Structure formats: structure tokens, C-alpha cells
Amino acid sequence: MMTQQFDFTNEEKEQALQLYSELREKTAPWLLNGDEERLRHHVMEAISHGQVVRDVFGLNPVVRSLQTALLAVDEMGLRRDAVLAIMLHPVVEGGLLTTEEASAGYGPSVGLILHGLHRIKELYAKDKAEPTNLSGTQGENFRNLLISLAEDMRVILIMIASRVNLMRLIRDTDKLEARREVSEEAAYLYAPLAHKLGLYKLKSELEDLSLKYLETEAYYHIKEKLNATKAARDAYIERFITPINEKLKATGMKFHMKGRTKSIHSIWQKMKKQKCPFEGVYDLFAIRIIIDCPVEEEKLQCWKTFAIITDMYTSNPKRMRDWLSVPKSNGYESLHITVLGPEQKWVEVQIRTERMDEVAERGVAAHWRYKGVKADTGGMDEWLRGIRQMLENADDGLQAMDQFRVELQDEEVYVFTPRGDLMKFPQGATVLDMAYHIHSKVGSACTGARIRSAEGRSQGDNGRIVTFRYELRSGDQVEILTSSTQRPKQEWLSIVKTSRAKAKIRLALKETQQKEALLVKEMLERKFRNRKIDLEESVMMRTMKKLGYKEASDFYRDLAADTLDVATVIDKYIEIQQGDKTPVADTRSAEEFVLDTSQISNLKSQISQDVLVIGKDLKGIDYQLAHCCNPIYGDNVFGFVTVNGGIKIHRSDCPNAPELRRRFGYRIVKAKWSGKGESQYQITLRVIGNDDLGIVNNLTSIISKDEKLLLRSINIDSHDGLFRGNLVVMMSDTARLETLIKKLRTVKGVKQVERV
């Protein structure tokens, strides 16, 4: 869609002059000498050179900038740097001013904001060459957009202000498809952002306008119902607040009260959630009591008001919200209570001070008006840092988008460390989230936690042990439990909720995979050296591809997990290498090349009756036990002749046995054990059972009591009340193995014991 160059209409000229006059009056105290003259010069120059253009809706960008700047000042409390950046943005986009020149003329802060706005404009233009269209941001561009937003909080605020202004202006447009896309984006990105930043008024307006444009019938149905019930609602509010007003005045407090009707979007969401008509939504409004008092008396006055109201009306303790003692991370402070008013109707009452109300209306930006008074926005800064870390570590844009939506959840839980430090997490966060919040090493070693509830602490309860999947609840005291043998796993990503934990887990997994790949690579090179095989990188890469691997990391990961046998790799490598060395006269391809069967015949002739007797002194024959199935004395086994003349001993029920027989039947030799089991063999047992205290100790004690058994390692992982563990044990034969399995099955809580 093409944009068109514009010139001011008479109506736009009058509107621009009026807006400019109003903006000038409001921003005059903050402007520096020369700001206004330079700004006017740059804007007029851009207009005269025709460098600014109308957007897809045909809107005048200069008028839009003036409207957005006024909205940012009035609703968010933004000042000089943000206002100048908003006004200069069309000039920068027109190419008559660079961000570097803006930094030199107006200060580095203005340049930083313009840089963020310019990056966002570039991302929009990249997809559809229209700044109002964001349908293409579902992929990598969405992540880049959010990284741009997270660079400077004022960029986020300006984008929200710009979107609110745009939503107000496109009511009568005939560009219905563009309006739909803008409205959808306002609903899924900007409204949640406004909510997270505490801009509740703008958040409600974005949601209502989105509903108006996307579901017009539902919007006007609710609006008509609200208008029809307004008189009755106002009368009820008056009956409710009159006695409260008298009581509060009698105390000498300074305050004012107002009724707030629930937004149309909120009513619509409640109707859908409860599957009820408009008449079924009872809590259509809330009463707000706003107290005027010094900062040092804020809590005292709020709790005093709380006591007066709960003495007059019966309260519902389950619906009380104390954001006075522990504010939200966006700075929101208020007391919310729900009481039973006249005619047995539930009414929500919000108690706050003038300062708290301004923060609630203008969000985090309002903190800047109160330097030294609750000016710490550390919670928000920490959130932005976490968002940035999450975005930079996400594997793709859609993943970033999903995680970002989770981060916008407003509900929070408050938990305590054993030392009494308070920590905040989003609803649904787990013990593992808290562990990674404390430190990456704590998170990667976390096995669970000891939880003491508020009631339990008061009664001297020592708490209960929970897995790291446990969802945190407000009031919990959490002591993280760790183990030096614990390692992060891929499935942990589905357990944690916070972007910070996800980013740290991904980083830990990458580091672990890199270390394992390096160790496996060294092991593979050692195996090649032992067999006197020259290792060529190009041949190895082809080997990986022939074995079905596109990435070397996946190849080494499977080798580390023993899901890929080293012998199989070496066989395939030699096969490809020998294929490369086939004489030119031989027209067979590498894939068609088959090992000379005379080598195998010669080897078989050395084995009496084609049966390999394991344990006897076999002259010239090198055999090894396969790692894929770890056979031990007593197992039914067979031998597999490798291309370099050695033999691998596999169990008859080895997972690789069917494939070996199908593809290389001519290399299979019979095998059996000789004498008695005199060697020590390594086997792995998988144990599953209830995650009870002491069960691991009971398992290991059985093994330690048998002098002929040696426990090499143990790895335990808990999941939803169950544990799964791998025990690696050294033993001599299958008879001893069967005895051990029977003993382990008798341990209380054990549900399953099987050989891996």
C-alpha cells in the first residue's frame, strides 16, 4: 500500500496551532534555552521539503505527534526528552535529521529515545512498508521489536501513548483491514504492556477500543446496557458512600471518593468466562477512597479507613488485596476490600492516597514526579533486564513472543527466604524459578525445597520437602535444596515460568552439551588412535550424514547418551573411507562397496565350530563387550565382526541386534561364556518408586551390604511425587543380578526395577 505526500488542510493548521500552544504551555518549565526555536526550525523544514508523509490511514503525522506528546505529558507525566523525541520523530524519519545530530543538539537522552523509535519504524517498514501494520512481527522481527522497547522505558511509554492516540483517531476510517490489524496488536501487545507498567486507565481504553473495532456488536450491547442502568447504579453508589463519607469526615481526614464503573472489555470478559448475560455480572463498579495526607502518614491513614469501613460493612476476607504492605513490581499501592453493601450487594472498595492514585493512573512514569519518595523502580528495571535476557536467549521470535506474554501476567506471589528476605514471582512460578533467581549455580543444582507456610512457622513446624516443580504460594518460606550430582535437563524449560530461569537453563544446557561434545569427541579420537585409523574431518562429516545427523551437536549428544554405538560409527567411517580409496577402475560407488567376506571367513575359521567361547585364550582375536547393551556373564550373547578384525559381544536382546542381523548377517558369529563369572561387569538398573524420605538410602544400603557388588554411580530425578533413578553397579554374573533386582523390589515404595 502506497503512502501519499501531504500538505496541511485549513482544519489541520488550526488544530496544530491549538495543540502546539497547549503543549508549549505545559512543557515550558522543562525546556532549555533554544529548544523551542530548534524544534520549530526542524519541523517546519521537514514540512517545507515534503519529507513527512501521511500514514496508511491518511493521518497528518505532525498533528499526530502533537496529540501523542500531549497524551504522554497528561497521562504519563513524561517531560522534556520524551516530548522532544516525539516531535522530532517525523523529522528523523523524513531524513532531515539523524539521531546523532539530535543527540548533539538536544542531548544524548533525546537521541537514545529517537534511536529506539527509529528501530521500531524500520521493523514495521521491513514487512509491509506501513508503520501501522504489524502482522509481520510474528517471527524474528517481533523479538527485535521487543528488544528495542526494552532499551529505554520511555520508548515503551511513547509507543503506548502513540497507539492510544491512533486508536482514538481511526474510529471512522474506511481502511477496515488496517484498523483490524492495529486493534489486534493493541489488544495482544500494548494493553498488556500498559497493564504491566501500571497504566490502568490507558490499558482499559486500549482494550475497550479494540473490542469496539473487533467485536462491534458486543461492545455496543454492553454500552447500551450500562447507559440504561446508569441512573440506578449512581443512586446505589450514593446510598453506599453517604454513611462512609460522614464517618470519615468525623475523623478530620482529608479525602474524596468516586465510583468507578468496570470497563466494557472487563464486563465482556466476565460474561464470556462465566457464560452469563450482562445482568449476571454483579460487580459492575468499585468505590475509590483517595486520601490527602503526608507521605509518613499514608499507611496509618489507609488502615484507619479500612477499619472504619469494615466496622460498617461485612467484608469478604478471601477477596482482600494488600498492595499497601507489599506493592506490585510496577509500583502500584492500594488496599482492596470487598464488602456487603445495602440490598446484599457486594461492592469493591479501593483505599489509597493522592500519590498512590497518581501512580495507579500514570503507572511507573509517575514515580519521576516524586524524587526521593518511592522513586525506586528497581522492580520494573529488574523486569526489563529479565525481558532483555530472555529475548536475547530465545531460539526464535515466536518463542520470544510466548515468553513475553507470560512475563506480562500481572498476578504475583510473595515468598520469603529462610533469612526473611521477600521475593516476588509471577503466578505459577515454581521452586526452580526461585532457585535460578538466587543464582545460576543454585538453580542448576536444585533438587527441591523445604516449604514452611505462614501457619506452620507460627506453630514451629519444620516444613515439608517438595520437588522443584512445586508452585510457590504467597507467604511460603522457601529453603532451596541442592545436590552436587544434579544437572539441568531439557524438560526443565517446561517447569519454570520466568524468562530469567528459562534463559539461564538454556545457557546451562548449551554449556553442558558443549562440554559433553568435547569429551565425546576426545573419546572418539582415542578409539580411532587405538585402532590405528586416520581420522579425517571430511570423512567424519560424511559419516555423520550417512548416520542421519544434520548437526554435529546431535551426533555427539547421542554418543554421550549411548544411544549411538561407537562401533557403529567406526564401521560406517571405515566403510566410507574405504569407498574413497576404491581404485578408479572400479565403477562401484562408496555406498555399493561391501567388505570383502574373505576377511570374515578367515576370522570365523579361527573360531571352533563358528562359536566364540568368551573367556578362552583366543589367539589373534580381539573382542570387546558392547556398550549399547553391556552384556555380563550368563547373558545370551552373539558376536559381531567389525571391519578392523575385532569382535563386539552383544546381548541377544540388544536394541541394535535386529538391525545388525538385517544389514550385516554375514558378520554375526555365535558366542557363549566359558567357566564361571570371574570378571566384574557394569550394568545399569532403572528404579522407579514413591519419592519418600530415606528410600534412596535404603536402596544403596542393600548394595553396600554385598561385598561382591560395587555401586559406581546413582542419578535420581523426582517428578510429581515419583522418583526415577539409574543405578550403575559392577557385578560378576546374571545370577547375582537377579538376586539384587529381587532385593531392590522389596524396598518399601519401590514400584519398578529393570535392567537398562
Image (spheres, rainbow, N blue to C red):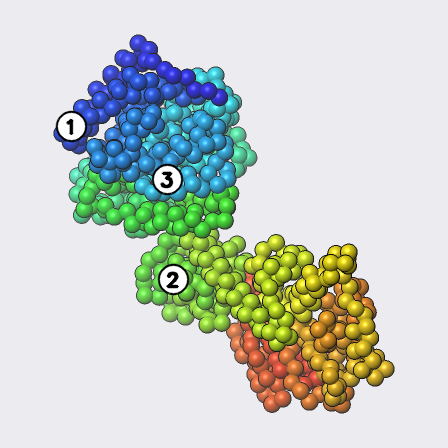
User: Between tags 3 and 1, which lies in front?
Assistant: 1
Q: How far apart are labels 2 and 3 at the CA level?
A: 26 Å
- Dot 3, how many residues are within 10 Å of its Cα: few (below 14), some (14-19), or many (20+)? many
Q: Which residue is mark 3?
A: 149
The residue located at (17%, 30%) in the rendering is 31
Q: Which residue is mark 2?
A: 439
Residue 663 visible from this viewpoint:
yes
Which of pointers 2 and 3 lies earlier in the amino acid sequence?
Answer: 3
Q: Quadrant of the C terminus?
A: bottom right
User: Between tags 2 and 3, which lies in front?
Assistant: 3
Query: In the rendered image, which quarter is residue 684 located in?
Result: bottom right
**Residue 385 x %, y %:** 35, 49
Which of pointers 1 and 2 lies earlier in the amino acid sequence?
Answer: 1
SS for dot 1: loop
Q: Is residue 44 left or right of residue 482?
A: left
Query: In the rendered image, which quarter is residue 282 located in?
Result: top left
The residue located at (35%, 63%) in the rendering is 417
Q: Amino acid at mark 2?
A: His
Q: Is there a contact, CB below 8 Å, between mark 2 and mark 3?
A: no
**Residue 632 x %, y %:** 70, 80
Q: Which residue is mark 1?
A: 34
Residue 290 visible from this viewpoint:
no
Looking at the picture, tell me which residue is in the foreground, 335 or 654: 654
**Residue lying furthest top:** 10
**Residue 663 x %, y %:** 78, 63
Q: How far apart are labels 1 and 2 at the CA level?
A: 49 Å
